[in-house]
Image (cartoon, rainbow, N blue to C red):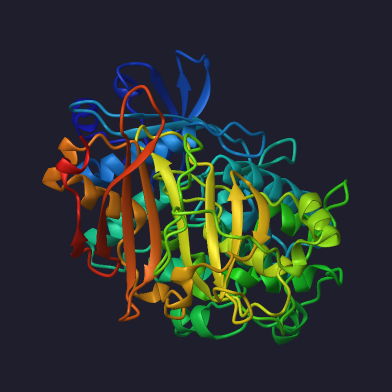
């Protein structure tokens, strides 16, 4: 009988552990007891013989184990999450795969309860702000750290917020739940989106690339539920409501359910701001959420965009638009624009009013933190923040429409440093205002001076990002597939995103080389222009004969 039980034992489906089969992972782990079970797999408490400590093992569902693509995604997520080391984040140790063995993820074991379970134990099914306040402070700190490491959670909800025996918050499942849920959903022909529906932002519902503001939305929905007993939208057509219906105030929701809970006056506006449909209207970081809630010890200056000011285009929060390859500082490469070439001679530069002493000092104090990274799965929305901060320090002359984004990178993959965002301004000489960035800091705001070519150039066309399907990485891959590329000694790749005469987003990739090995003279060797909608090549002037 015991042999039959042993032969049928599977850590994913069986709760009773036969003595002979308590070892997994090549004998490194000794299973002790099951601690959790759900659609994302089974979690076991185990003892790690190598670390000499208790760990949690998340046994992967068979849909994951049998899907090579899912395993590849999970390996990447595990590597990304494994680098996170923070007292309020559950530590990921490793992904274990072995022939004829179960695949599982080893992680820190948290001996405690999650906030969802704790809420359900309360008579009125809500948690008080007095109890939640230190938890929210720790959550903001954990998210701020993770986002700084370029990791977005993508599945933030009460069930992923654990409390250990010291009442310390532990945020679990960074990125891992997304891969598992996406795979199971794909195989079962369900919607291929990550996260739990009631906590997902409109952009996440639409399948957009993950961004920090998705976590901000999910955090708002999570706190909303913990304080009122239900998430903002919980019945009916949730997808429609998440996209189109404003969340009720917390007091109104409590009144609807005839539930009482003392919520400080500063909390509701912050939570509702997190739940804005437009990511540009949400707090742009977890630290900003904490500051607005009064949870930071030090003073943090927060400058909010008033509701009656121009609202930045919603789509600019999307990473497909945001992932702009920024500049390498190897060479001073001239900027190219639609109708102008700035490299022939240096045009006269006239600064706008906002770069006078007072505002320049304000910009310097703000030291806007912008992340720009090459080939990132996500980033703090680089272009979006550039637009927001640029618009903030420009005066009301600017209509705020983004015309183009220009950036360069070294062919050797050097980390990006410099890039520019151009706005339409009807009062500027070339109808443009440029906001320049170096690394994470906004350096200056200025108008490109008048040039002969600019007199005959058409009015700049605002970018329509809703038509953008080819991101910067894919544009580079199309470039690298061209047969001429192997014969060109490329040193610098300059990228420009703009609209053509059909209002179609267009990638213009200009290649630069060095004429001789003993000089740093930059030589333009050709360009590739391709559609940002479908990737078709519009112009190809890549000719090896250009470089002799």
Q: Is residue 166 left or right of residue 411?
A: right
Q: How many marks?
A: 0
Residue at 43% from the left image edge and 74% from the top image edge: 463
Q: Nearer the viewer, residue 280 or 491?
A: 491
Q: Nearer the viewer, residue 539 or 456?
A: 456
* Quadrant in which the C terminus appears: top left
Q: Is residue 285 left or right of residue 198?
A: right
Determine if residue 178 is in view: yes
Depicted 224 relative to depicted 146: above or below: below
Residue 486 picture location, percent across and down? 16, 37
In the figure, residue 156 lies in which quadrant? bottom right
Residue 442 picture location, percent across and down? 66, 52
Residue at 77% from the left image edge and 80% from the top image edge: 251
Residue 68 picture location, percent across and down? 20, 42
Depicted 235 relative to depicted 372: above or below: below
Q: Is residue 343 left or right of residue 304?
A: left
* Quadrant in which the N terminus appears: top left
Residue 376 picture location, percent across and down? 43, 46
In the figure, residue 436 lies in which quadrant? bottom right
Residue at 21% from the left image edge and 52% from the top image edge: 478
Residue at 43% from the left image edge and 65% from the top image edge: 340
Depicted 132 relative to depicted 330: above or below: below
Q: Nearer the viewer, residue 7 or 126?
A: 126
Q: Is residue 233 left or right of residue 22?
A: right
Depicted 424 relative to depicted 388: above or below: below
Determine if residue 202 is in view: no
Q: Nearer the viewer, residue 152 or 484?
A: 484
Q: Residue furthest left?
A: 483
């Amino acid at each position: 009988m015991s042999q039959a039980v042993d032969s049928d034992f599977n850590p994913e489906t069986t709760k009773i552990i036969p003595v002979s089969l308590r070892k997994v992972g090549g004998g490194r782990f000794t299973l002790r007891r099951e601690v959790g079970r759900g659609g994302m797999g089974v979690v076991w408490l185990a003892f790690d013989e190598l670390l000499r400590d208790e760990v949690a093992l998340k046994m992967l569902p068979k849909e994951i184990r049998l899907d090579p693509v899912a395993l590849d995604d999970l390996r990447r997520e595990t590597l990304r999450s494994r680098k996170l080391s923070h007292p309020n984040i559950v530590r990921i140790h490793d992904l274990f795969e072995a022939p004829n063995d179960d695949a599982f993820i080893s992680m820190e074991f948290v001996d405690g309860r999650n906030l969802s379970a704790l809420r359900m134990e309360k008579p009125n099914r809500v948690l008080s702000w007095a109890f939640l306040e230190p938890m929210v402070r720790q959550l903001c700190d954990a998210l701020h750290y993770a986002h700084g490491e370029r990791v977005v959670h993508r599945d933030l909800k009460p069930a992923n917020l654990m409390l250990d025996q010291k009442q310390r918050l532990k945020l679990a499942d960074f990125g891992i739940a997304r891969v598992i849920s996406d795979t199971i959903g794909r195989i079962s022909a369900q919607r291929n989106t990550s996260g739990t529906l009631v906590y997902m932002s409109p952009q996440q519902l639409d399948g957009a690339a993950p961004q920090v503001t998705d976590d901000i939305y999910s955090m708002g929905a999570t706190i909303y539920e913990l304080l009122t007993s239900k998430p903002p939208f919980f019945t009916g057509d949730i997808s429609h409501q998440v996209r189109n219906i404003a969340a009720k105030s917390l007091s109104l929701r409590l009144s609807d359910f005839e539930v009482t809970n003392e919520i400080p006056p500063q909390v509701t506006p912050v939570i509702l701001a997190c739940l804005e449909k437009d990511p540009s209207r949400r707090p742009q970081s977890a630290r900003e959420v904490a500051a607005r809630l009064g949870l930071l010890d030090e003073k943090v200056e927060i400058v909010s965009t008033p509701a009656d000011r121009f609202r930045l285009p919603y789509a600019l929060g999307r990473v497909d638009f945001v992932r702009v390859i920024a500049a390498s500082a190897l060479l001073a490469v001239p900027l190219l624009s639609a109708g102008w070439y700035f490299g022939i001679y240096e045009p006269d530069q006239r600064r706008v009013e906002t770069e006078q002493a007072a505002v320049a000092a304000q910009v310097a104090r703000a030291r806007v933190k912008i992340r720009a990274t090459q080939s990132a799965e996500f980033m703090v929305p680089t272009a979006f923040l550039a637009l927001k901060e640029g618009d903030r320090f420009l005066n009301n002359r600017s209509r705020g429409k983004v015309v183009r984004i220009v950036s360069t990178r070294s062919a050797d993959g050097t980390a990006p440093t410099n890039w520019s965002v151009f706005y339409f301004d009807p009062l500027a000489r070339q109808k443009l205002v440029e906001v320049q960035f170096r690394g994470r800091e906004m350096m200056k705001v200025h108008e490109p001076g008048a040039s002969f070519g600019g007199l005959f150039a058409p009015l700049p066309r605002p970018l329509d990002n809703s038509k953008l399907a080819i991101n910067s990485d894919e544009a580079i891959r199309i470039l690298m597939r061209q047969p001429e590329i192997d014969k060109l000694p490329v040193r610098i790749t300059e990228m420009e995103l703009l609209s053509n005469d059909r209002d179609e987003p267009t990638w213009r990739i200009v290649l630069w080389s060095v004429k001789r090995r003993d000089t740093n003279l930059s030589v333009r060797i050709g360009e590739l222009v391709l559609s940002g909608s479908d990737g078709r090549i519009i112009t190809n002037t890549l000719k090896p004969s250009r470089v002799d």
